[in-house]
Amino acid sequence: MIHASPNDVSPHGSETIIRPDPSPVPSSLLYQWWYQRETTDQHREHQERHGYSTGCLEAIYNTALLYLHETLDHIALVLLAYSILCIVLYRVLFHRAAGSAWYGRWLMRRSHLPPCNRALLVTAHPDDEVMFFGPTILELRRRQCRVFVLCLSEGNHDRKGAVRRQELWDACESLGVRAEDITLVNATHLQDDPTAEWKTVTIANQLLRQLESLDAELLITFDKEGVSGHPNHCAIYYATASLCLSGMIPSNCKVLTLETVNLCRKYLSIFDLPVTLLLSTNWVILSWRARRAVQNAMRLHSSQMVWFRKLYIIFSRYMVINSLREINKSDVEFEILDT
């Protein structure tokens, strides 16, 4: 503001000199100006920091997204190449041209099982023989090997024992097993029940009796994981292992156990072929036509055809591939100690 002071009036009284007021700016206005400046600087600094952080996060996100796209592309290419390899191997395996003998000798074989004339298959429930061992049964029958089936329960867990007994006979007949070569045990201490404990000695006595009466050269059953983890399946393995440890298995009889695979491999169907050929010592691989024969035999167990078993028939490797491992006394000792 501009003020006139008394000292600024000329002595003649006719002229007034007006000068600026030298009084200082009020402190409240100065404080407001300083506060606004500080606030503006802080806001600018905050925006700069926020912009830098946002830029870093955005750069990291874009880089991660780029690598993810590249990784997914690589995974897709690997899966495509693996699928093509499986299909080619499967076609070569069943190639029937003039060069098929060369493929069979030098690349791979459709099956690799010990030679035998009489084989005993031991299962826990009706439908086990097809659901898990169907390819092995078909291959043994193709070799003119006589297959005996010992089923240790009639599958009466759902009170369908009589129905499942007939389904067992029908399914085995469709796979080429004679009706007189099937033995079904219906004992009170060997009932189809996941919570029931099957005594090792009881199962071992049943196995030993069958081996001695049939003069079997090959005994086939579950491994210690039981494929599906069912306690009744596992109990058969431990009974077999006890016979191996005690030396009661006839010397001319070899023991094969069906290998349990992880969940991913279990439902890969023929796409488990390369892994099976690399990791297994004994295997059976069916043609697509023979696979349908196993599927049809499984459908004869109509009382068990719930929705998830229908999916199992389509996707399970056990419908087309069996991988088995021969066990002996030393193997059993190691497994039992490890358990």
Image: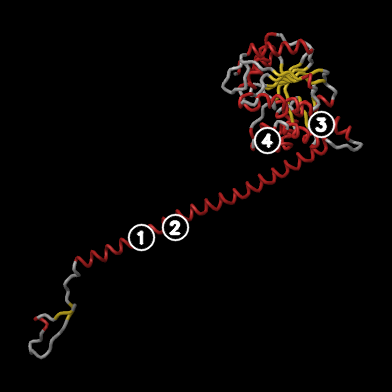
Task: Tell me where residue 127 sits by quadrant.
Answer: top right
Looking at the picture, which amino acid does disc 3 mark?
Answer: Met
* Most foreground residue, 301 or 66: 301
Q: What residue is rendered at 59% in x and 51% in y?
A: 66
Q: Which residue is mark 2?
A: 51
Q: Report the side of 72 relative to 288 (left or right).
A: left
Looking at the picture, which amino acid does disc 4 mark?
Answer: Tyr
Looking at the picture, which amino acid does disc 2 mark?
Answer: Gly
| N-term mark: 1 or 2 | 1
Q: Which residue is mark 4?
A: 312
Judged from the image, the secondary structure of the residue bearing numbered disc 2 is: helix
| Vertical side of 16 occupied by 286: above or below | above
- Rate crowding at label 2 as few (under 14), some (14 to 19) or many (20 or more) other CA atoms within 10 Å: few
Q: What residue is rendered at 74% in x and 34% in y?
A: 295
| Vertical side of 69 occupied by 243: above or below | above
Front tag of 1 and 3: 3
Q: Separation of disc 1 and disc 4 at Cα?
A: 64 Å
CB-based contact (under 8 Å), mark 1 and mark 2: no
Where is residue 63? Give x, y as percent. Answer: 56, 51
Q: Separation of disc 4 and disc 2 at Cα?
A: 55 Å
CB-based contact (under 8 Å), mark 1 and mark 3: no
> On residue 246, which mark appears?
none
| N-term mark: 4 or 2 | 2
Looking at the picture, which amino acid does disc 1 mark?
Answer: His
Q: Which residue is mark 1?
A: 43
Where is residue 32? Give x, y as percent. Answer: 25, 65
> On residue 108, which mark appears?
3
